[in-house]
Every structure is written in C-alpha cells, then in structure tokens.
Amino acid sequence: MFAAMRSFGMEAVHLFSDAATGLEAIIAIHNTRLGPALGGCRYQPYGSLDLALADAMRLARGMSYKAALAGLPHGGGKTVILRPPHVDDRAALFEAYGRAIESLRGRYITAMDSGTSNQDMDCIAQHTGHVTSTTAAGDPSPHTALGVLAGIRAAARAQLGSDSLDGVRICVQGAGNVGSALVAMLAAEGADVLVADLDTGKVHLLVDEYGGQPVAPDAVFETPCDIFAPCGLGGVLNHDSIMQLRCAVVAGAANNQLADPEAANALDARGILYAPDYVINAGGLLHVALTHQQTSPGEIAERVKGIGQRLDMIFADSQAESRSPSVIADRQAEAILYPEQG
C-alpha cells in the first residue's frame, strides 16, 4: 500500500466501511498544497481492491494537475465506492458516505462522477457541506463540453491553421452527457460530426437531431477524420489504437486517455497533436469548484473558455521544444504543485 502511495505521490488514502449500508469507500487525497482536495465520487464494481485503489490514486493525481493548470485553489482527490451486486437502500449508503466525508473536516470536497448523480450528492449533503454537484449546483457536463470545444478550437489553430470548425470532420467517441453536449456544440459550429457509442440508440438520437453520421464502435480509431474526440472511458490510446488513427488531432473529454506515458510519444511520433486530457476537460472541475464558491454563471463560463488559451501556450511550447504537449503540461502543473523542485 505505502509503495503504491509513494509511486502516485499521495498524501493520504482513507478506507471507510459501513456494514449497515454496505458502503466500502476509498478516498484518495493526492495534494493539498493549494487548498482542500476536490474530486468526484465513482460508484462502480471493481475486480479487486487493488484495482480500485490504483484507480482512485491515479484519478486523484490527475485532479491535482487539472486544478493546478485551471488556476483553482484546490488539490486533487478522488473517491471510489465499490458497488456491490445489490444495495437495499442507495440513499442510506450515500448518507453514510456523507458522514465519512464530514469526518475529514474539510480536507476533501466530493462531487459527481461515473455512476453517481445529483440526487446522490443531495443525500451526501444531508451530512456534510463538503460536497458539490448537488441538484441545486447543477450538472457540470455542459461546462465540460464547453471547455472541450474551446480546446478543440485551440488544437485546430495549432494543427489545422484555423480555429473555424466549419466543415472540419470530428469523430466523437462516447455519447454520454458530455459527449452529447459536445456533439450539439460542434454541430452549431458547422462541423461534420461523426458519433460512436456502444449504445446505438443514443447515437441515432444525436444524428437525427444534429446531423452527421454514426460510426461503429469497433471502427472508430480507423475512421478518417480531422479531429478524434474521445469522450468515453479512459485508456483508449495505446500502441495498437494509435497506429490505427487517421486524424491530425486528438482532443476529447475522457479522463486518463493515455494507456501509459509512452502513448504521448507515440502520438507525437505520428505527427498527431494531443490535447492533454486533464487540461482540455477541466470545465467540469471549474464548474463544481466555482459553483461551490458561489461564483456567477457568467464568470464560470469565461473561466471555462480560458482553457483554450492555456492550450495555446502548451502547444506553442511543445512546438518550440519539440516535445509532446503531455510532457509540457505535466511540467507546468508540477511547477505549480512543487515549486521547491523548480
């Protein structure tokens, strides 16, 4: 356990169990140098405790980097709740989780993530104020999509020579809340949108409403396009999938898109511009953090649009130094998180 924590640079990992509700939760806190850790709560089954721990720590570290480059006074944290096969009372389970959050005395603020909802956050809020993404706070997905749109424009400027998306062929992998919102925004920009998802019903609804065309999930990497936007599960960019890509840019909303650090170099070697995921998808984090601080919606939207400017700088440094944008982004985040190492 301690060796794994050191490898991810973790400050703390908390395990919580509540026999009455079946709660088994891991709260990973990566860094609180800039402020209390902030990160979502995942509720899904895992094959083993080790897999759940690794997922929580990897995601918590990513949240620290994301918050640092988004200019937020927060560190990174993440919760993984191991979803049991059957739950008698979901509300009671999340209330128990709320009590666990409260016991940390503000060191960690939780939020919605994969498998959780605004209603789950409402249950948590009955026992702690250290929660956002409640029904009152609203859905962060539109702001995540807005930030990805700003990032796609920045990538188009750097790689295609124009930030106009009119006629640009963009393949969106994943038709969840963020992917669907992004498809709507891209269609409004005049982009030629392709959509892939395991749920073909969602795909056809989007195509019917916004135009474009469906793509089979197993053909998504080899489909020719200008920009590939992964907006589903992480780890999709590995050696095999990168060799199949027929695009100029990878810029999407999914977390942990790179299967391993070498994937960034493989994209660079193929001349494919990569928008680091924790930079381009920071709109959701900005939404939850700034809503928690009672920032106005207009100011939140402006901060989210600033993601494009951050990527402009990353892409410029990447070109000047002939290094992957992923390496540049990591260096910039680490300079903020660990100034003593500079």
Image: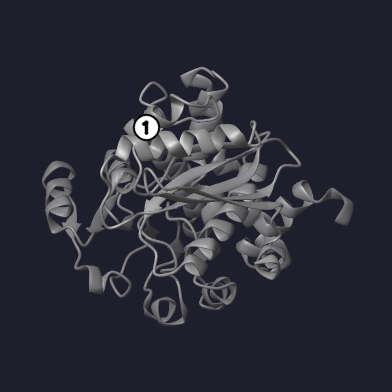
- In the foreground, 188 or 23: 23
Left or right placement of residue 253 versus residue 192 in this view: right
Instruction: Tell me which amino acid carries mark 1.
Output: Asp
Estimate the x, y position of residue 76 in percent, counting from the top left.
62, 46
Estimate the x, y position of residue 276 in percent, counting from the top left.
55, 57
Q: Is residue 4 above or below residue 342?
A: below
Quadrant location of the N terminus in the rendered image: bottom right
SS at mark 1 in the image: loop
Left or right placement of residue 309 versus residue 297 in this view: right
- In the foreground, 135 or 73: 135
Q: Extreme front residue here?
A: 20
The residue sitting at 30% across, 51% down in the picture is 167
Q: Is residue 263 above or below residue 284?
A: below
- Whether residue 199 is visible here, answered yes or no, is yes
Q: Is residue 10 above or below residue 39?
A: below
Query: Crowding at label 1, few (<14), some or many (≥20) Cα neighbours within 10 Å?
Result: some
Quadrant location of the C terminus in the rendered image: bottom right
User: How is colour applied across the structure in the image?
Assistant: one colour
Estimate the x, y position of residue 48 in percent, counting from the top left.
44, 69
Q: Quadrant of residue 145?
A: top left
The residue sitting at 57% across, 32% down in the picture is 102
Left or right placement of residue 114 versus residue 104 in this view: left
The residue sitting at 62% across, 55% down in the picture is 61
Estimate the x, y position of residue 15 in percent, counting from the top left.
56, 52
So how many labels did they put on this image?
1
Q: Which residue is mark 1?
A: 139
- In the foreground, 159 or 5: 5
- Whether residue 140 is visible here, answered yes or no, is no
Q: Quadrant of residue 194?
A: bottom left
